[in-house]
Each structure stands twice: as structure tokens, then as C-alpha cells.
Image (cartoon, helix red, strand yellow):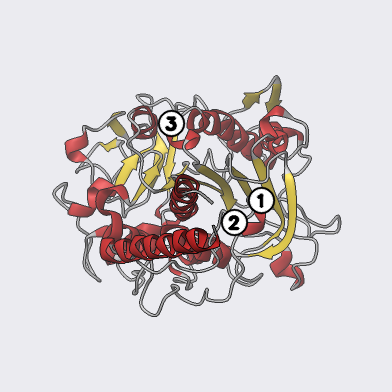
Amino acid sequence: MTKRTLGVSLLAMVIATSANAAQIGDVFYIALENHNFTQPSDAPSGTPEQLLGNPAASFLNSLVTPGNPAAAFTSYATKYQNVSPTLHPSEPNYVYQVTGKTGPLNDADPYPSNIVSGANLGQLLQQKYGTAGWKAYQEDIDLVPNSGSVNQPGANSLTSTEAPKTQWTVPTTSFSGTSASYTNSYNGSDQYNYAVKHNPFAFSTATNGGTATAPNFSPSNPEAQYYAPLQQLQTDLNDNAVAKFNWITPDQYNDMHSSLKTNFTYNGATYLAGTDQEAVALGDNFLSKVVPEIEASQAFKNNGVIVIWNDETEGDEDVGSTAGYSGTEIVISKLAKGNAASVGAYYTHASDLVTWQNVFGVSGPGGYLGGVAGADNLGALFQPGVIPNGIPEPRSWAMMLLGFAGLAVAGRRARRTVAVAG
């Protein structure tokens, strides 16, 4: 072995080590509502329609169809569950997704009494990466009510459709309604419906800037910069200014939660107002616009990851068994297995939290947040070696230099061995 060959080999080792330590780029979660990905044929009466094979969800199904061009970078789980069939409604599942522990077992706003104590993923990312750590893109939060300031109580009609950035606040109050001055960018309706229960970071004082008993609606709240209206997503993608971890919540008409008061036409089919299939079509229409928007960005091309996720399985709580029920967990990334690879591992929300703590190397008090230690990470959805199997130990520059020094010593010893052998 020549000195040149040995030097190249050592450099390759260093480069490989660095690449393996930072494979995943920016992560984008798109949160959907209240529909099973699959469910048994004898699901209880009233259970919403499943998504797999649903004609109203043509875009989502293209992502999980092998050979479809839309599925080139996708993998999906066939046995994804919320934490248990008894964990309902939405709010505790959203809270668990970022804290590893259940929140209040209701859908009430954070204040006056639903604040969740303890660390969350956003807080850990913020501590490590600052403002680049996380961001929550929430549809409708920039709408201005006819009284008070943006995101404060009393929003029953609108005076404008876009509030200036200087008025953005932490959105800890839900509001919904109809306004002739508003047109939804995705479904064309005049209805809006922001629900804090679908915004998990708003339930912790560490990431909402309030106290345990009172919100902080001031635009000077330092946490306000982490909550952006959904319209800001395209701007941030264009500017390559998204965060490491991005949580995207459509309003309740675009996340499959609710149907409109009017009919909705999608892909040539008209879905009747007030029907479950209309809610499915509304959510699929949203995905068909937002997913390509993200895929076209530099953030996605730089090993970014899109996760299409839903909060809870439906109907299994009535029968007390998860058999045949699964939630939606679709991963889109150049680092995924691709071509709609299906993975039958049993995953829950704990798997997501373990995965991103591993990927971003963020540790809470005692390591993993809440009760998620021991959960399988999402590694089987990705190419081998992409997802670390534990939270990487922080490596200082001094430790890295010591590592390089060790490689240098090994190189000198190898060269002496080669010289003696020669």
C-alpha cells in the first residue's frame, strides 16, 4: 500500500463517517384526520371510509402504487397505529407525537387548563438549532378577526385575508367561520377552521411562550416566529429557509376532518356537501398541491423527508381490537426504500418520536421523551443505515480532532508496517 493510497483511504473513511452522520435533511410532516388507511370489512357502522383504494383519494393512492411515477420515492407502513385503540380524541395523539406522553383526553384549547408539562421535540430542536430547529405551518392562523388582534378570541368574521407578519402571534385559540372576504387557496370555499388541537407545540409553555395559566398573544412573544401561516411555506421553500423539522397542519376542511357546506368537485367528480367522501376528496386535493410543492424544493432534493401522517385509527376503539386497522404513515424521500415499498413492522407515534430524536441527535431529560424508549424507529421505511439506532452522542470539535489524530496515528503505523514488509 502506497502513502497516497493510504491517505485516500483515510480521507474516504472520514468523508463516509461525516455522510453517515447527516444523511437526513429537512423533515416535513403533513397531518391528516379521522380516516383509517385500512380497516376490516366489518368495521362498526359510522366508521369513516378507509383511504387505501378510495377513489376520492386518488393522489394518496398514487403514492402507494408500485410502478406509479408518484411512488418513486415512497415507502409506507401497513400496521401503523396511534398509541392505543383507547387513546382518543385527536389532541392527546398530537401531543404524544411531540412529547411521548398523552396530553389531556379532550380536544380543548391549551388555555385555561390544558397545558402539558415536560419537554417536547420542538423545544429540544430549538435548544440545539435555534430558529432553524422547527416551525409549525398552520392554515388560517393569519386571518384577522373583526375584533381584537390576530388569533385572539372573537374571530367570527374577517376584515382581511392576510395579516402582516408583524402581527403574527402564537395561535393558542381555535376559530372558525365563514367570510365573503375570504377564499381558501386549496378548496375555493369561503370557510375557515383553525383548530389548536391539531397544533401540538401550542400545548407547552416552552414552545408557546405563555405561562401555565395564561397565553401570550403579543407579537413580541419570542415563540411567535416558530408559527407561520401556511401561505408562508411556499416562500420559505423558495428561499430555502425552512426548518429542520416542519409541522404542517391544514385547516379542518383540508385535513379530511370535516366536509364543506357546499359541494366540491375534484378530478372531475362532484362530492356532496356534508359527506365523508367529500372530506376525503378535500384532503387529497390538498395533498396533491402541497406534496409536489415540497418535492420541487431544494430542501427536499437535499435528502428531505415528507411524512403523510394521521393522528388516530377509527372504529377499533368500539371493538377493542386493532386487528385490521391501520393509520396513515407514508414516507417520501430519496432516502426511502422507494417504489411504494410496504413495511409490515408495528409502528406507533412513539416510533416517529424515537426516529427524529435519533436523526437530529436531541436528547431530553433521561434520553428519550416520555415513554417512547424501546419503540422501533422508522428505519425499515428507509434505505439501510439511514436512520441511526440510537441518539448519537454529541461530538465536539475537540473530539473530532482526537478522532482524526487517531486516524493519523493508524496511518503512520500502517506506513511503517508497509515499509518493514517491503
Q: Is residue 50 at all visible to an observer of this figure?
A: no
Indicate which disc, 2 or 3, sits on the residue closer to the N terminus. 3
Q: Nearer the viewer, residue 301 or 211?
A: 301
Q: Nearer the viewer, residue 161 or 2?
A: 2
User: Residue 75 in the image: x percent, y percent?
Assistant: 68, 46
The residue sitting at the bottom extreme is 366
Query: To which quarter of the image does residue 323 belong?
Result: bottom right
Query: To which quarter of the image does residue 66 belong?
Result: top right
Q: Residues within 10 Å of mark 2 (few under 14, many from 20)?
A: few
Amino acid type at circle 3 is Gln
Which residue sits at x=66%, y=69%?
Answer: 85
Q: Is residue 231 above or below residue 81?
A: above
Mark 2 and mark 3 in contact? Answer it, CB < 8 Å.
no
Specify the label residue 385 is tagged with: 2
Indicate which label's residue lies in the foreground, 1 or 3. 3
Indicate which label's residue lies in the foreground, 1 or 2. 2
Secondary structure of the residue carrying tag 1 is: loop
The residue sitting at the right extreme is 41
Indicate which label's residue lies in the foreground, 2 or 3. 2
Amino acid type at circle 1 is His
Q: Is residue 110 left or right of residue 84?
A: left
Which residue sits at x=39%, y=43%?
Answer: 138
Specify the label residue 298 is tagged with: 3
User: Residue 384 in the image: x percent, y percent?
Assistant: 64, 54
User: Residue 114 in the image: x percent, y percent?
Assistant: 36, 69
Gap in angstroms between the C-alphas marked 1 and 2 = 32 Å
Indicate which disc, 1 or 2, sits on the residue closer to the N terminus. 1
User: Residue 279 in the image: x percent, y percent?
Assistant: 62, 39
